[in-house]
Image (cartoon, grey):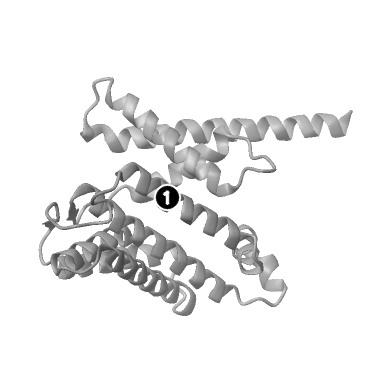
Amino acid sequence: VDGSFTLGGAVIAVVLKNGLSPVIGSVIALIVGLAAGLLTGILHVEIKISNLLSGILVMGILYSVNLRIMGRANIPIFSQANIFSNFDPLMIIIIIAAIFKVSLDFFLRTGLGYTLKAVGDNPQMVKSLGIDIGKIKIFGLMLSNGMVAFSGSIMAQYSGFSDISMGIGTLILGIASIIIGTSVIKKGRYLRETTLVIAGTIIYQITIYFAMNTGLTPVDLKMIASVVIVIFMGVSNMKASESKRGRRMIDNA
């Protein structure tokens, strides 16, 4: 994830430096992100390398690839036109997030979407139905890495530069958003998983903002992020334990 995020930023920086359209650059970033996901999937599914090690290997590969693409560790793109030029950045981000949310919600209600979620929840059950879970895993990795790379291209345009270390912490942010969103907000009939993740992201960023305003420095950011995740995971696990205890009491009554 961290490497794919930087990959998107590297691609958009080079594209803009060469005078091409920022929209085309963002699409190219998405495509190369798909390729990164495909590589991870091949290592894991076809070569039988563990999922964790596959991700680590691809992250190392992408570090060198990103440096090759950029030619140096940092590329400023303040003077290049981007998707935020002449528009309110907040509105553009909201529109992009809304498009991806609606698209994901629609996809996850399709047969392939349900299968993808099932592979994540219970791969053995899906395999017993005669479905090739390897192909589903590869597709999921391609989809996720493509979106991450696209996000990296958007972030680079918003920041005005692309940096080789811009992807560090992206995975932690993603995990925190999921944990916080699902532990704080109770999923209802009309609340999709994507809504919970978006809400979790906002809560996480607000928490980090207030933590930084208490006198902590950016050096402490990783520690703050880890503490926030631990707290919300603890709350989530406590709720789950209480729920199980309540069900046992009802069953024994």
Which residue is at the front of the view, 40 or 51? 40
Which residue is at the front of the view, 235 or 25? 25
| SS of the residue under disc 1 | helix
Position of the N terminus, as image quadrant, is bottom left
- Identity of the residue furthest to the top in this view: 214
Q: Is residue 138 above or below residue 215?
A: below
In this rendering, position of residue 123 left or right of residue 32: right
* Residue in view at x 50 percent, y 37 percent: 180
In this rendering, position of residue 36 left or right of residue 157: right
The location of residue 230, given as percent across then percent down, is 45, 34
Residue 151 appears in the figure = yes
The location of residue 244, given as percent across then percent down, is 72, 35
Q: Residues within 10 Å of mark 1 (few under 14, many from 20)?
A: few
* Residue in view at x 59 percent, y 59 percent: 106
Position of the C terminus, as image quadrant, is top right
- Identity of the residue furthest to the right in this view: 253
Quarter occupied by residue 34 = bottom left
Quarter occupied by residue 32 = bottom left
In this rendering, position of residue 33 left or right of residue 115: left
* Residue in view at x 63 percent, y 31 percent: 239
Disc 1: which residue: 95
